[in-house]
Structures are given as structure tokens and as C-alpha cells.
Image: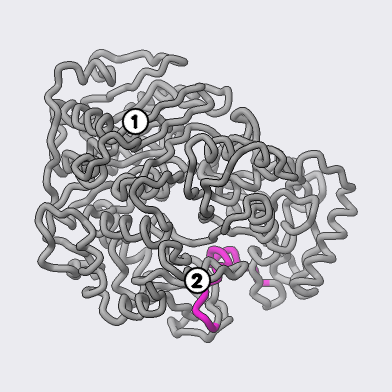
Amino acid sequence: MDYNEQYRASIANPEAYWAEQAKNIAWYKAPQTTLTTTDWGTHSWYADGELNTCYLAVDHQVEQGRGDQVALYYDSPVTDTKEAITFNDLKGRVSRFAGTLRNLGVEKGDTVVIYMPMIPEAAVAMLACARLGAVHSVVFGGFAPHELAIRIDDAKPKVILTASCGVEFDKKIAYKPLVDKAIELASHRPPHTLVCQRPMLKAEMDPSRDLDWYQAQEGVEPAECVPVKGSDPLYILYTSGTTGQPKGIVRDNGGYAVALRYALNNVYGMEAGDVWWGASDIGWVVGHSFIVYGPLMGGCSAIFYEGKPIKTPDAGAFWRIIEEYKVNSMFCAPTAFRAVRKEDAQGDLAKKYDLSSLRWIFVAGEKLDSSTYYWLDDLLKVPVVDHWWQTETGWPVTAPMMGWDSPSEPRLGSTNKPIPGYDIQVLDGDGEPVGAMEAGNICIKLPLPPGVAWSIWNNNDRFVSSYLTAFPGYYHTGDGGYKDEDNYVYITGRTDDVINVSGHRLSTGEMEEVVSAHAAVAECAVIGMADELKGQIPVGLIVLKAGVEIDEDQLESELVAMVREQVGALACFRRAVVVQRLPKTRSGKILRAILRKIAASEEYKMPSTIDDESILPEIEEKIKAVGIA
């Protein structure tokens, strides 16, 4: 297919374009209306169609003759467990568990909170909810009780699904006490908690509320799929919740199904029978879209991995998975590959494995720096595809169409061209489009394509104020960037990651690109610090590659020279501080806002999404020791 022809068609007549794509979905009742406008000004796709997402992901695949094909390869190096679950097996597990939920009173439209590690039961739980037409809300396993409690109060689930523990490296994290504390803190008290007992750590059970995962399924009549409307919600995914009401992004059934099938085949180039690996967690949007629903609806075999990229048992864990399961395509955040590179800079571990099944690797979630790109490109000899999307969109916004005959060529620093359906415009502060190569606010002209969130749970007004008010007629992504003359999109970072140095608006992402290219640097974060004379000045926090020994003053001098040469003297980049590690969310994003607060000696609240709380005191101590804060 020709990109330009398809893109023009999608923008000129969105309804006709997406009506055609909807034919790729096995509806119970095909939609008669393609696009409708909600009362609060967003757009709903296929509202009157009838379908069931679990049916598309499981039953339909069995009906298509894929019953004996592996649906999920469960691989858990942290527990030394492997399992190949066929579509037939998955159907049996899901229908039985759906019957169990039904016996506990869960019906179409009810909510269920899932707080689980990366074990097959978690995928079964999601699909079982979808089977009943219930709305699930997966909360990342290990969230603090307070964060879980406010999500419980917002979603008001009939049941909470959890496990006795999660495992990170050799550390066992007890989940059940966290759930118990959250229920104690919450105003809403679900009558039942189902607990999947793991052999490495058993949870104490409260007989008045707690049920054993497998005992509860004994003698249960399996449940069939419940038809739902295209506009009915499939899940809630919370993006924040530290104060007040959390922001629960709502994803519908109809538009999401069409979008995921479109993305899997056209963006990612996957076909039924291929092996796909989304190296993420079900607690994040990638896990929903491209570990569970997308690959299964497309008839692929999906990798369900419980582990980290390193120390499981070494930095060759990813390469072992690719060889063992003959992975055709993989999706991952750049931070994971930087962690691998830090431990194995020459890529020696990758050379021990047969990676010939791999066609390409997709990266997203944060900026892909050039040094990581070139390292992967040289090591794997397959296309390394940068692309961009958000929790709110649910599927990619910019990417080359790898399923088409002539995908757009990569351009370093760009996340590629807009995917059909996304009319991306770069606007200035007054909402006026800017020219090519001019920076501004990345916005998407309405209507948004299928699959993109169009509400916040129980708070339509908040969706409008958060995303549609700043630039009327557009969805405001919150990201800054620019387009070149060929419509390639360049994301420079969140709009609050631009710093103002003596009146010059400079991207910290651009400086990070330069700093990360230094041979000694594994990863970095550049933050803006207050300066009496210039307003703000940039400071680099640097993590060295494993085994590298370099004088810190010498490194600082070299980095200052590199930024001066490639960005310019106006950047005023003069300080680089070596730290042991950078604070990140559990999905691998660097917590730059917190770093800015630390550097400014401001008070901060421990982020609920942080991977390791002990990192922040380390950073504070180092910044004070070198006299910045």
C-alpha cells in the first residue's frame, strides 16, 4: 500500500477510511454508524456495533483453526518457570475464570481491579473481564497502598484480583499485605479478593473476604462471551493519582479492536502465526495493547515475560528469549537496551544467540538517543524503528508502516511520519500552525482516530479540560516538537522540559542526545536549574558505562565541549555530575520533574510510579556534595 494515498484518504474522509478498516473485525453485529460526537465534544467510533473483545482474542482464533497454536509463551527467569499456553487452553482458562467472576456477582458494566505480577493468571483475568463485558482496571503490581486505594475508590470494583507476591530479581514483594492495607484505606470495600497463591510466598487469607484463585474455580460452569456495544468501556487505565481524583483513561471496545488490528498488521507488520514480544508489563498501556489484546486478536503468539533485561541471569536475557521462541518482532523502551548496553557494551552476549528470526525492533516510551540506536543497529543488523504514542492514544501515533511494501525511511531523531488517521499539527501558543522545522506544541486535529481515549472515568469535563481546551479543535498531546518539510515528526520532550536560557528556549532532549553520544556515558538526564543571571542553566546527570574509569572533571570538560560544539555556546551547558543511577518509573521513564525539584532544593513528594525510592537520596547527596543545590 502507498503511504501518501492512505494518509490522504484517512484525513480527507475519516469515516469512510475507518468504516473500511472495521471490516477486518469479526463483529456480532456490524456497526451502522461509524462516527458519533459525544455530549462533551469528543468522538466515539462504531458506537452501535456489537462485539466482544475476548471473543476476538480467543474464541475467534480457535474458530479460525488456531486452537493448537501457542497463544502465550510464559517465560519467568526469576522463578525458573516456562509454559506454552495454546489458544484452546487459554479459552478453557478464561471461560472458567469468567464463570468464577460471574458467580461472585460480576456482570456486564461492573468494574474489577487487577493488581498482579506478570503471570499468566493476569492475562486470564483481563480476558475474563472482557468476556463478561466487565470493565477491568489493571494497577501496576507493587503500587503503594495509598495509590491502590484511590484507584479502588474511583473505580469501585466488585472484586479485586491479586497474587501473593511479585518477584524482582531475587526479591519477593508481598502483594497481599499491600492490597489489605489499600482496602483498609479505601472508602469503597469490595466484598471479595481473589488471591493467586504463588509457591515462593504464600499469603495469609482473611476468610471473610479472601478466596483462593483455583479453589474458587472448582466446579464452576464456564461463561460464554457477552455481547457489548462498540462504545461500551473495555478498561480503565490510570495515568496519575497522587492528589485528588486519579485520571482514569477509558478505552472502548469497538474502536480499540479496530485500531489494534490495524496497528498490528500495518504498523508492526505482524501476521497470524508470527511471534511477537511486547517487553513491558500489563500495568502499562503497552501491556494492554501489545502484550494481551493486540497480538491475540491478530492470531499471533505473544511472549509473556516476567523478568528484567539484565541479571536474569545476565544481560543476555533478551537475546535468549528471541532465540528460544523465534521472536519475529519486539517492542521495548530504549532504557532497557541502555541497561543491557551498560552491562555488555560490546554486545558479546548477543553474539552467542541465533537472532535470525528477528525482522525488526520497535522502541518507544522515551527519546531514542543516537548512541543507543547505532549500538542496536550495528549489533542486530535489523531495522531499529523509533515510534511515538501515549497512554491516551492506546496505539501508535507516528511510525513507519512496516506492514506495507515501502515503509517510510527512518530519520534519526524523528519518530517518523503520522500514521493514517492522525492529523498532526504543530501549533504556537496562540493555536496557529507554525512552519516546517519550527518548534511548537504537538497537537492532533479532531476527530481522533479509533482506539484513542475519549473520556476519563466518571469525569468527562476533566478530559475536555486536560486535552481539548488549550487548543480548541485539537487534542493537546502535552509534547513539544516540530515537523520537517516531509512531514516527519520530531518530539523534543514534554513542553515543560524546554528550558529558557537567557531568553533562548532550548530542549533538554537535544542536549541529552549530545551527552549520551560520549563513549563513557550509559545514560543521562539534562535538567534546567534556576540561575539569577540567565533564568535557567542546564545540568547533566550522568551514569557511566560498566567498567569505565574516567576523571569526573575530565568528563565534564569533554561534555561541555561537545554541547558547545553541537548545540552552541548559548546553551550554557557547564556542569555534568556523575551519579550511580537515575530515578525511573517502573516502565523505565526518567523522573525528570523530581530531578528538577531536587536540584532546586525544593520539597517533593515521592512519586507513586518510582521503581526504587532509595535512588533519590543518592542523587540529593551527590548534588549537594558537588555544590549545585
Q: Point out the stretch of residues depicted in magenta.
A: 485-500
Looking at this view, is 601 or 621 the one in front? 621
Report, in whole angstroms, how far the alpha carbon at label 2 lies from the one at label 1. 36 Å
**Residue 496 lies within the magenta run:** yes
Mark 2 belongs to which amino acid? Ser
Quadrant (top left/top right/bottom left/bottom right) for the N terminus:
bottom left
Which element carries disc 2, helix, strand or loop?
loop
Q: Which residue is mark 2?
A: 408
The residue shown at (77%, 65%) is 573
Q: Is residue 192 magenta?
A: no
Q: Nearer the viewer, residue 583 or 601?
A: 583
* Callouts 2 and 1 close, C-beta under 8 Å: no
Does label 2 or label 1 sit earlier along the sequence?
1
| 600 lies above or below 441 | above
Residue assigned mark 1: 85
Residue 189 appears in the rendering: no
